[in-house]
Image (cartoon, rainbow, N blue to C red):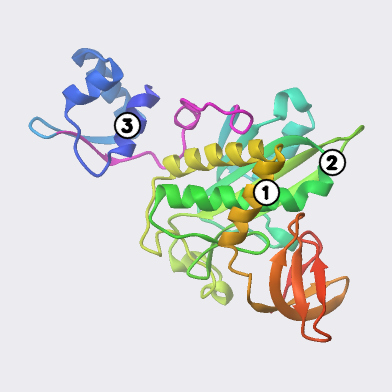
């Protein structure tokens, strides 16, 4: 399968492409192009061939394809290895299994699943999605002081995911602190960062990202339907393959920039500009106690800074131990 051809057809799905243009762009002779089109058809692509207008992609396979996700990836880290599975208890679990085999094999590994039987979110919540309806991604990275950087990684990953959604659709995407992706205040995705130390100062981190793509309202439990949505429900229907590629590229970019102080500061500013929690009055729970106040800032470690109603003082609440309750 020539992933160059399938990706070009995906990117130009809104209009037919003359066969001559495709062949010239990919340096494929007419007979070779015809064979590659036949191969795509065998793989589940539906391609309309109009002798006047050219080739048009009418349908794609239900599942993500590793060759398409990996093609042309100039990854510094994220996406150096890509694994796609149909079903898993959790992509984070598969990522942790790989991490247990060592840094050389797992650093930068991206695992994607079409369905999770036990997908998890923050604070033990379940992540539910019908098969082939979402991006369900987990990435392994090895970092110094891994547990201490979970908040910063959550911020960077949320920014990367928001940019990826906007790159594949027209949806303006915000971040609801600490780990939700929102469009019009409805959750369309989430981040789950899990960190485990190992011997020495380097630890393993698994970054889990879920994005709702094509679910209908009936896919969500009734009690949360007003608060969640898929991109399809909001009038967007991005190609999941192009969205997944964009997500890997942007996650690789932001993680690479975290090593530079100026880059890390820019990521913090860009994420704060998207934060829908800033300026709002909320109630949080931390250490068994509840606190109410106005969100006035995010600190360097992605902690929430509240001006408390009682006393009017400022207090910072760590991202990893704080829960928004109102």
Q: Kindly identify which numbered label has been placed on residue 265.
A: 1
**In this picture, residue 102 sits left or right of residue 75:** right
Point out the frontmost of discs 2 and 1. Answer: 1
**Which stretch did the figure color magenta?**
54-80
The local secondary structure at tag 2 comes to loop
Q: Which quarter of the figure is the C terminus placed in?
A: bottom right
Extreme residue in the front direction:
262
Point 75% across, 60% down: residue: 299
Above or below: residue 276 compared with residue 291: above
Q: Kindly identify which numbered label has been placed on residue 18.
A: none
The local secondary structure at tag 1 comes to helix
Q: Quadrant of residue 13?
A: top left
Q: How many discs appear?
A: 3
Q: Nearer the viewer, residue 294 or 99?
A: 294
Above or below: residue 24 compared with residue 206: above
Task: Give the residue number, with chain letter if any, for mark 2.
Answer: 145
Point 19% across, 37% down: residue: 16
Query: Which comes before the other along the chain, label 1 or label 3?
Result: 3
Q: Quadrant of residue 144?
A: top right
x and y percentages locating residue 39 in the rendered image: 32, 23
Gap between marks 1 and 3 measured at Cα: 36 Å
Point out the frontmost of discs 1 and 3. Answer: 1
Q: Which quarter of the figure is the N terminus placed in?
A: top left
Gap between marks 2 and 3 measured at Cα: 41 Å
* Label 1 environment density (alpha carbons within 10 Å; few <14, some 14–19, many ≥20): some
The local secondary structure at tag 3 comes to helix
Task: Give the residue number, with chain letter if any, for mark 3.
Answer: 8
Q: Quadrant of residue 126?
A: bottom right
């Amino acid at each position: 399968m020539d992933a160059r051809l399938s990706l070009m057809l995906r990117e130009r799905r809104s209009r037919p492409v003359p066969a001559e243009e495709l062949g010239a762009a990919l340096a494929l002779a007419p007979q070779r192009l015809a064979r590659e089109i036949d191969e795509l058809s065998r793989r589940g692509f539906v391609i309309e061939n109009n002798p006047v207008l050219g080739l048009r992609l009418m349908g794609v396979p239900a599942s993500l394809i590793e060759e398409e996700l990996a093609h042309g990836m100039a990854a510094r880290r994220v996406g150096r290895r890509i694994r796609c599975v149909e079903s898993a208890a959790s992509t984070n679990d598969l990522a942790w299994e790989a991490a247990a085999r060592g840094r050389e094999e797992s650093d930068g590994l991206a695992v994607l699943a079409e369905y999770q039987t036990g997908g998890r979110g923050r604070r033990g919540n379940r992540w539910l999605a019908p098969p082939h309806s979402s991006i369900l991604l987990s990435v392994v990275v090895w970092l110094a002081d891994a547990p201490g950087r979970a908040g910063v990684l959550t911020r960077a990953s949320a920014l990367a995911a928001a940019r990826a959604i906007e790159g594949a659709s027209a949806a303006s995407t915000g971040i609801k602190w600490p780990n939700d992706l929102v469009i019009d205040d409805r959750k369309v995705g989430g981040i789950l960062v899990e960190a485990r130390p190992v011997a020495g100062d380097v630890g393993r981190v698994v970054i889990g990202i879920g994005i709702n793509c094509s679910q209908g309202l009936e896919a969500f439990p009734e009690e949360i339907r007003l608060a969640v949505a898929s991109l399809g429900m909001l009038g967007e229907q991005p190609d999941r393959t192009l969205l997944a590629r964009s997500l890997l590229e942007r996650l690789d970019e932001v993680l690479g920039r975290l090593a530079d102080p100026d880059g890390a500061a820019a990521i913090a500013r860009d994420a704060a500009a998207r934060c829908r929690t800033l300026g709002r009055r909320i109630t949080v729970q931390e250490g068994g106690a509840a606190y109410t106040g106005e969100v006035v800032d995010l600190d360097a470690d992605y902690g929430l800074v509240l001006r408390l109603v009682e006393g009017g003082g400022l207090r910072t609440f760590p991202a990893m131990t704080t829960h928004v309750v109102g």
